[in-house]
Image (cartoon, rainbow, N blue to C red):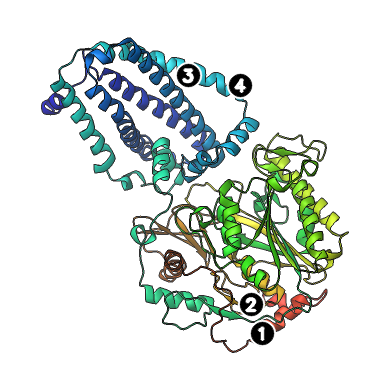
Amino acid sequence: MAFLLKFFPFPRYNSRFVLLTRLLQLLLVVFFLLRLYLTWVSWVDIPKSPVTLLLIFGGGLVQDLAFSLFAILPAALLLLVIPQRLLASRPLTLLSRLVVFFSMTGLAFVVAAEVLFWQEFSTRFNFIAVDYLIYRREVTQNIYESYPMAIIILYLVVASLILFKVLSAALTCSLTATEPVSHRITRFSGLVILALIAGVALPHGLLKRSTNNYVNELATNGPYQFVAAFRNNTLNYRTFYHLGDDKALSRQLRRQLHATSPAHNLYDITRTVDGDGQAQPLNVILVTVESLSAKYLDHLPDSSSHYLGRTPFLDRLATQSLFFTNLYATGTRTARGLEAITLSLPPTPGRSLVKRPDNGPFYSLGGVLKQHGYDTAFLYGGRGFFDNMNAFFSGNGYRIVDEGDFSDNEITFKNAWGVCDEDLYAKTLQQADKVSGEHRPFFFHLMTTSNHRPYTYPDGKIDIPSGTGREGAVRYTDYALENFFRNARHHDWFENTIFVVVADHCAGSAGKVGLPVARYHIPLFIYAPNHIAAARYTKIASQIDLAPTLLGLLGIDYTSHFFGEDVLAPGYQPRALIGNYQKLGLYHNNRLVILEPQQVISQIDDPWHSESLEPGDPHAADVELAEAYYQGADYLIQRNLHHRDHKSRPIPAPRSTARSTSVSKLNVKGVLGHLLFKAVCCGKK
C-alpha cells in the first residue's frame, strides 16, 4: 500500500493535477447519483437483493472509473507539457475557465440526455444514441417539440454554474501551482496506468452477470457505452459469436427453406417458387406503421387496457382481413423493420443493412415485383435521408417519394419527423392514380411517421389533443388509416389492390431480459376482399416471412433467395427471429434461444410468461437452427452473395400441386375455403 501511495501520490494544492483529482471525484459522484435515480425509477423491474445492488453500483463504479480516467487523459497530457509561464498567463487562464465551464455544461447535458433516453428506451446510450447524433436536425426538432425546453435550458444553466463552482478553486490552484517536471511525469504515468487497469485489465464480461437486462444496463456507464457504440456499429459474427460447422448448418438451413440449388454451395438457399399467376397482376400497397405494437389492438391477447378502444378501425379490419395474430418484428428500430420486410433477412449483429454503406442492390421484394412489370416506389412522409432510407431503397430499385416531393399545398401538417399520415396517404392516392392510368401494376411501400414522439398531429381530427402522448398518436394513426381506406374505395384500382398493414417495430422493446418476446409482437393485416377472404392466422411467424407470403398470395413465379418463408405453404414450420444490436434470438416450440457475443448461448422456456434464463445447456436442435439462420445470413452478406440476381433460375424442382391449389383458392374472387384455414391458419401458438 505504501508503494502504491508513493507511485500514485494524492495531488496536493501545490500540484497541477489537483483539478483532475477534483474532476474525477465530481464525475464519480454525478454518475453515482444518476445511477441511483435510474435505479429508483426502475425499481419495480429489478430483483430486490444485496447482490443486485452490488452488481449495479459495484459494476457501475468500475465503468464510471474507466470512462472518467480516459476522459481526463487529454487534459492530463496538456497539464504535463504546458510551460508554467504559459499556463499562468491571463489568456490561458480565461480559456481554461471557459473550457471547464462548457465541459460542465456538457456533463449536465449528458445527465439530462441519459434520463430522457432511459424514459424512452429503458437502456443506457447505444446505437440509437449514435444515430440521433448523426441525424441532428430531426432529433433536435423532435426534442424541441416533445419536452419543456425552457425548463431544460434553465436546468443546464443552473447545473453548469454549480458544477463550475465546485471546480473553480481547484482550477485556480492547478493554474498557479509550481511543480517539477519529474513530479508531473510521475502523476501522469500513474494516471495512465490506472486508466489501463480500469479499462483493459478488468474484463467487460464481469459487468454483465445478471439475467435481468435492467440490472445490466444500470451497471453500465452511458458515455462509455456511447463511445463503444460509435466505434463498433457492426459486430463481426465470426469473431464474437459461437460458430457451428458451416457444412452442417448449411444443410440444416437448406432443409428448413426447401432449397433446390446445388448443395455444394454453402448456405445457397436458392429455390424455385411456382405460383399459379394472375391474368391481371394485383397492385400492392404496403403500409409500414411506425411503432404499431400489438398491445394497441383489442383483438389480441396482450392488448393493453390503457389503449382500449383507441384503434376501432384496425379492430374492424382484423375481422375483414387475413389477420396474423402471432407475428414478431425482427428488431427494435425502423431500419431493422424495413430490412426484414424488404429483404427477408434475419437481424444480423450491429446496424441494419439499411444503414450500412454497402446496402444494395440486394435481392428484395421490390426487385422481384419489378421483374414482373410493377412500378415499385417507397413513399415516406419525412426526409428520406434519415436512417439512410433513400439510399437504401433507391439502391434497390425503388422510386423515392419523400417530404421533398410534397408541394406546399399538399402539406396540411408536419412536425420534426415529417408530414402527417393523412398527407402521406393523400400523396399515395395521387401516385396510384398516375401509375394506374399508365396501365401498370404498382407496388408502393409506405412508411408513416405520426405515431412517434412528439405525438403531434392536426388539431380537430380526434378527441385527444395533439402532443399529449402516445395514446393520442395511436388514435390518430387509426383515424388516418380509416380515412385512407375510405378514400381508396373511390378509385378504379381499389378492386385489384392488396393492402398490407404491418408495424416496423413495437413502441418499446426493453425488458427484464435482453429479448422480451412480448415486446416484439406486432400485427399484420392483408386486406383484399375481392381476392382474399378474411381469416385469422395464429401460427408463429416472423417479419421476414411477409415478402414470400405476399408473393405467394399474388401467385407469382420467381426464384427465391429469401430467408423468410411463405407461411401459407405446406410444410411451414413456425418460428420467429428477433434481435437487438447484439443479442440474436430464435423463438421456436415455446422456447427462446439467444446467441450473444463472447460465444454465449442461453435459453428461456415459455418466454411469454417467464423472463428467467434456464440453467444447463440450451435445446440443441434450437441452437442449431438459430445458428443456421444467423451464421448463414452473415456468411452470405459478408461475401455479397445476397445481392440481386432476379433473372437467374436454378434447375426447377418438381412442381408441387399442393401450393397451387392453396394459392388458387386464395386468389379466386371472394373465395377462401374453410378447410384450408383449418389446416393452415389455425395452428396453436
| Picture coordinates of residue 306, whole percent (x, y) | 69, 43
Three-letter amino acid code at disc 1? Ala
User: For the residue labelled by badge 3, is the local secondary structure a helix, a strand or a loop?
Assistant: helix
Q: Residues within 10 Å of mark 2 (few under 14, many from 20)?
A: some
Marking on residue 150: 4
Label 2's element? loop
- SS state under label 1: helix
Residue type at mark 2 is Ala
Q: Indicate the position of residue 581 as horizontal and vertical percent values.
A: 46, 52
Label 3, label 4: how far apart the Cα atoms are: 14 Å
Would you place residue 275 above or below residue 242 in this image?
Answer: below
Q: Disc 3 versus disc 2: distance between alpha carbons? A: 61 Å
Residue at image mark 1: 658
Considering every residue shown, the one lying at the far right of the view is 490
Which of the image's four quarters has the N terminus? Answer: top left
User: Looking at the rendered structure, which numbered label has been put on residue 569?
Assistant: 2
Mark 1 and mark 4 residues within 8 Å of each other at the beta carbon: no
Labels 3 and 2: the sequence-earlier one: 3
